[in-house]
Image (spheres, helix red, strand yellow):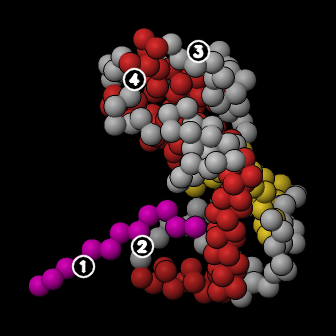
Amino acid sequence: MTVLLMYVDDILITGNNLAHVASLITHVHSTFSMKELGLINYFLGVSITPSDSGYFLSQTKYALDIITKAGMADCKPAPSPMSVKPSSLSSATVAYSNPSLYRSIVGALQYLTITRPDISFAVNHACQTMHSPTEADFASVKHLLRYLKGTLHQGLSFTPGPLVLLVFSDSDWAGSISDCRSTTGCCVFLGPNLISCSAKTQPIVSRSSTEAEYRALAQVAAELSWLQMLLTDLRITHPCPIL
């Protein structure tokens, strides 16, 4: 006899047709043993706070847990995610004594970027040294944790608005000290709501600031085309996007 075990955890059901939502819940009840928890307020580490204007998403408890895990619960806040001062040459060459802790903290910080896009670039920078972190790398992570300590209650707001895609793109020029490559940064809004943001190193070296900007625009335009196709598949009408 073959027994098939099916286990489903943490399901979020939403929609603008209450009858369809109720029908789906009834169908799921007939297949699984399910407990309804009512209106959403906490989901997969993300706190959802409703208001008259929409929803506010934050990960305050999750961020505090990361800070505590690093032994920095009593640290002083920092004003920015990354330090503008370069690390000393000695700390940049000395291997960090506890690389598993480094990987664990940086891995947890990746999930925090869901509601904290302001730390995406700093976290991406930390991820590049997970294979062999140095004392300077961990000092940078500690600086980021100090920034989080002072901004624990920040998050993302979502409010109703027109379904218009609006994208902001920018880049530096030869910003990487190691290989002189540029970094593309972009933020994608659907109406008043931020739905995507990224900071990526460009694949090749740009020979001018203009070339770096055009590469950034091309990269963002490709993502914008994909989002347009996604909205079309969802049968959502939208005007021409603004880049």
Q: Secondary structure at mark 4?
A: loop
Depth check, front residue: 28 or 152: 152
Please name the residue that numbered disc 3 is placed on.
Answer: 74
For the residues bearing labels 2 and 3, Cβ distance under 8 angstroms: no
Majority SS type along the magenta span: loop
Q: Secondary structure at mark 1?
A: loop
Of marks 2 and 1, the one in the foreground: 1
Can see residue 144? yes
Q: Secondary structure at mark 3?
A: loop
Earlier residue among tags 2 and 3: 2
Vertical comparison of 183 with 125: above or below: below
Q: Which residues are magenta?
A: 1-12
Task: Tell me the residue at 84%/68% (across/down).
Answer: 242
Of marks 1 and 3, the one in the foreground: 3
Earlier residue among tags 4 and 3: 3
- The amino acid sitting under disc 1 is Leu
